[in-house]
Image: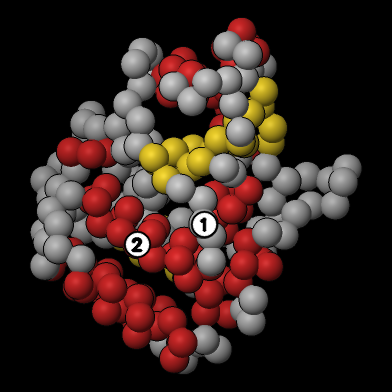
Amino acid sequence: MIVASHQADLLPYSGFWYKMAKADLFDLKIFDQFVDRGYQRRVRMRGAWASMPVLGNPKYIPINEVRIDPVESPKALAKLIHGRYVGSRNWDKYGPMFEDAVKSIRTDRLWHFNVELILLVRDVLGIRTPLSMSVPTEGRGSVGLVSVLKTYGSPTYLSGNGARAYMGDCREFDEAGIRVIWSPHAPVTGDSILSVLMDHEDPLQVVLAEHEEGTS
């Protein structure tokens, strides 16, 4: 079984969806520490940051505890989506859908808001991979991730290349009998998945694009 994992980010870029499409199970890490300037609350749209307003000063708390205004925060994001993408090639097909979806989500939790949009994008792309949310039983970083993967037996773990910084030589994974493979995804943009949906005739084909063998 191939398992992939990632934080429940805000409308994340295509590499997130590549891992989901290629995995047998996708684990959403909503118990990781929130990063104020991280991708849990912001993403690039048309090359510029688009941020989801959050309440208070949520430092040093888990992602699942970060709160948003259930009315004003979605309205602000919907306005950003309209401003960045109206007039795009596929705006009529996807724009109103995402504006309405964003404004219709009623929750005061950032993670819940993001997961609702992740489910929508998964359906739009035609990805059928089931999602899960597991609580690490020990440690953080690689140790915490290994503890989650152990709950699924000893799967193969599909990782994004950005994780190399904290996964290092993957010693913890090897010791747990977990094989690590690195994503060969070749993104056409570092923008939100919305840019792929708005600009391309076959968004899933863009999501599944890979580097040629021997390149990175």
Left or right of 57? Residue 177 is: right
The residue depicted at 46 percent of the width and 56 percent of the height is: 12
Q: Where is residue 22 shown, x and y percent of the image?
A: 63, 48
Q: Label 2 sits on what residue type?
A: Leu
Q: Residues within 10 Å of mark 1 (few under 14, many from 20)?
A: few
Quadrant of the image occupied by residue 105 = bottom left
Residue topped by disc 2: 117
Which residue extends farthest right? 214
Q: Where is residue 202 shown, x and y percent of the image?
A: 64, 76
Left or right of 80? Residue 12 is: right
Quadrant of the image occupied by residue 189 = bottom right
Helix, strand or loop status at disc 2: helix
| Of marks 2 and 1, the one in the foreground | 1
Regarding residue 76, the answer to whether it shows in the image is no
Helix, strand or loop status at disc 1: loop
Image: 115 above or below 31: below
